[in-house]
Amino acid sequence: MPSPVELPLLYAVLFAPGPREGRAQDASPYVPVVFERPADAESTAPHGLSKSVAAALPGLWYCLHLPAMLLDLVDIPIRQLKAAQQLLLDHHILLVPIDCFDADRIGDLLQGRHPVLAVCPDELLDEARKRASSLGFALPATPYSQLNDATLAAQWRAIHQQFVPELPALAGELPLSYRLDLAPLTLPHRRLARQMGWPTAESTVQDTEAERAFIQALRGQIHLATLARLEREGTSPEDAERRFPRTAKEEAARLKVPLALGLPGTAPMYARNAYDGQLRRQLEPQPAVSPDDTWSVTLHERPDHLVERAAVEFAVTHQAIASSGLGLMLPTVPREAFLALADLERHFIDGPSSAVTRRLLTRLNDAAQSLWSDELRAAIERAPALTVFSDFPLGLLTMPEDTAPLCARLPVAYRPLQPLTRTLQLQTAAPPPLGLNHRIKVLIAECIPINDRIGRLSREGWRLARETATSDALTVVQAETLTLDALRKAVAEHRPDILVISAHGTMVGNFAALHIGGAPRLFLGIDHMPPVVMLSACHVAPRGSGAVAITDLLLREGALAVLGTQVPVDVRHNATLMNRFLVYLAEECSKPRQFATLLDVWHHVQTSNAVNDILTATPKLKKWAASPTPGGRPVIAEFMATRATGRIRRPHVYKDTEQILGEIAEDQGQGHRIRNWFRSPGYIPESLFYVFAGRPDRIFLSSLRHQTERAFAAG
C-alpha cells in the first residue's frame, strides 16, 4: 500500500449540468464520461466540447497550478525529480456536474486520494461548499471570482499546513499562467523551477513566441539532468561547480525528455457530415500560437475556436506536467493532409500496391510539411516517446531527414480529440498506472466463423501464439465467441488482462465497427472491461475520413489502452505481429530486461517487424528468406542472429533492413535481383498502420512500487 505522502491530491471542478450530464433523477454512480454529437447546438465546433463542460475550463486550468502530490510541497533530491519523469504523476481532477457531487455518486472516486479543493462558478458556490464539506474536502470551495495569484499562494500554504506541517515548505510562488498556447512549455518549467529554486515568474516568456519558451524549457531540462547526474555520483559542491560545464554538454547530447503534443484538426469528410455549409466556412485553420489565447475566469465565453484551443492545451499541459516534460501545441492539421490520408486508407481496401502506397505516403508528407517547426523536430529528437492528442496519425508522417515514419523512430500513444468532452473527462480522470506484476492472462476471442477462410487462418495463427507465448508469466486462452453475448460471457468467465478480439472490421457509413454475430458493433457492453484490448481486425481505427471508430469508443467503455488497425491488413501478417508481441511480453515479464511499459514492448515488436514486412511481401521474397547463405543458415536467421545486430537505426529501419538484406544477397551472388524485388513488386510497411490509443504508457510490466523504486534508484 502507498504511504499517505505518495497518495495524489484530489481536486474537483464543478459545473452546472447540461441536459445530458445531470443524474439527479437517480443515485447511480457518476461515470466521468459522456458522449454528445459534436453537431449538438450545445457543443462547440468542430471538436465537440459540451458548453456546460466548457464552463469548467477556468477551474481546470487553475488546478494545474496547485500541487499534484504532497511531494510537490517539499524539497526532494534532484535525482528523484529527474527519475519521477518516468512515473506520470498526474493531477487528479474530478470534472463533475454539481448535482453528482455527493457520496452516493462519487464516493468510490475519492478512495486512495486526499480530497483538497473544489472550484466552481460563483453561482454554484453555496451548494458547492456544503457538498465539499460533507465529502471531507480539506479547503473550502473557491469561486471563479477568487481565482488569482493571491488565492493560489494562500492555498499552497494551506495545503502544506494541512498535510505536511512538520516539513519545511519550499520557497517561491507559482503565479497563474497568462499565455495558454505556451503553457505546455512554460508551466511544467515553472513547476520544476520552484523545486530547483529558480525564478518562477512567467514574465520572461509571456510576451514571446514558442521559440524562446522552448529554449528556456529545454535549458531547464538539461540543467536538471546535469545536476541529477552530479548528485547521483556523490559529487562535492566544489567538484560539481568545476565539472558542471562539461557534464551539461554531455547531458545535452543524450537528453531524453517526455513529450506531449496537441494536434487539432477535423477530417473534411466528417465536417461535411456533421455541420452545415455556413458553419464549415467558419472553421478556419488555427496557428500553433496565438497572442489572444490567454487565461481568464471567462475564457469559456469566447468563440468556439479559442474555447477548444484552451481545452486541448489543458490536456497537453496536464500530460506535460505529469511527466515533468515538454508539451507543444501544433497548428491545425492541413485539410490536404486529411484528404491524402483518406486516399491512402482507401487504397488498402482492394489490396495495396507498393508503388502507389509509397506515392501516397509522399503526398501525405508533402501535405503536412507545415507541421514541422524547428521546435517540434528538436523536441522529438530528445523524446523517449510521444503522447499525441489528435485524431490525425502523426506517427505516419516522416520527419525531415528520416526515411521511415515517425512511429518507427519512437513509441506513439494517441489520445483522440473527438469529441473533446470525452477527451477532457478521460484526461482528468487520471487512472492509476497499472502494474502487470502477476501472471498475465490473454483471452483470444474468435468472432469469425470457422467456415470463413479468414476465420480458419486466424485460428491457426492464434493456436501458434498459444503454443509459443504461454509461459509461467503469461497464459493464452482461445474462446469461440461468435455472438456478442458469447463474447461478454467469455470475458466474464476468464477476466483477462488483455483481450484480443479476432473479428472482421466493417465500415457502415462513417462508423468503423466490429462485425460480431452477424451485425456491426460499435458498443460491446462488456462488464469489467479488460485494461488492454487488441483488435485483430481490419480498418477499425481509420483516421482520414474522421470515422467514429470502435478503437476510440472502447476507451469510453473502460479500456485503458486499445490497439487497432488503420487499414485492412493481411491476416497472416497480423498473426505474425501479434504472436511476436505476446512472445516478447511473456519474455519480458519472466525476465525483465529493457521494456518498462506495454507501449515499449509494442514499439519494439512493430519496428523489428520491418524485416517480416519485406520478406513476406511476395512468394519469391518469402522463398528467398528461407534459402541458405554461404554459412549454411537461412537468410532470415543470418539477418537476425548476426547481420542486423547494432546496425538498425529506427528512423531508417526499412532502409537499413534493405541494406543488410542486400548484403546477404550479394554474398549469395544475387544482390541486384533481390534489391530489384524490394522495388518491384515491392513491399508494404504494413506494421506501421496500427494505432495504440489511450494510455499504453501507463501499463507497467511490474508493480507501481517497483517502478517507483527502480526509477528513484536509477535517478
Image (cartoon, rainbow, N blue to C red):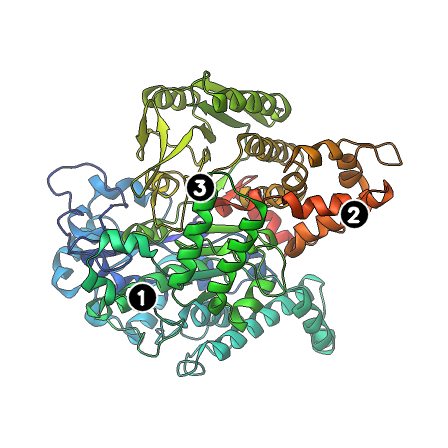
The quarter holding residue 398 reads bottom right
- The 10 Å Cα crowd at callout 2, few under 14, some 14 to 19, many 20 or more, is few
Residue 672 - label: 2
Front-lying residue, 450 or 117: 450
As measured in the structure, the alpha-carbon distance from the residue carrying label 1 to the one carrying label 2 is 55 Å
Residue 106 lies left or right of residue 375; in this view the side is: left
Q: Earlier in the sequence, mark 3 or mark 2?
A: 3
Residue 161 visible, this orientation: no
Q: Position of residue 479 (x, y in %)?
A: 46, 18
394 in relation to 518, above or below:
below
Q: Secondary structure at mark 3?
A: strand
Three-letter residue code for mark 1: Ala
Q: Which residue is mark 3?
A: 561
Residue 682 visible, this orientation: yes
Three-letter residue code for mark 2: His
In the rendered image, which quarter contains the C terminus?
A: bottom right
Q: Secondary structure at mark 1?
A: helix
Label 1 or label 2, whichever lies nearer to me, is 2
Front-lying residue, 591 or 532: 532
Label 3 or label 2, whichever lies nearer to me, is 2
Q: Secondary structure at mark 2?
A: helix
Three-letter residue code for mark 3: Ala
Residue 310 - label: 1
Q: Residue at x 47, y 55 (%)?
A: 387
Residue 690 - label: none
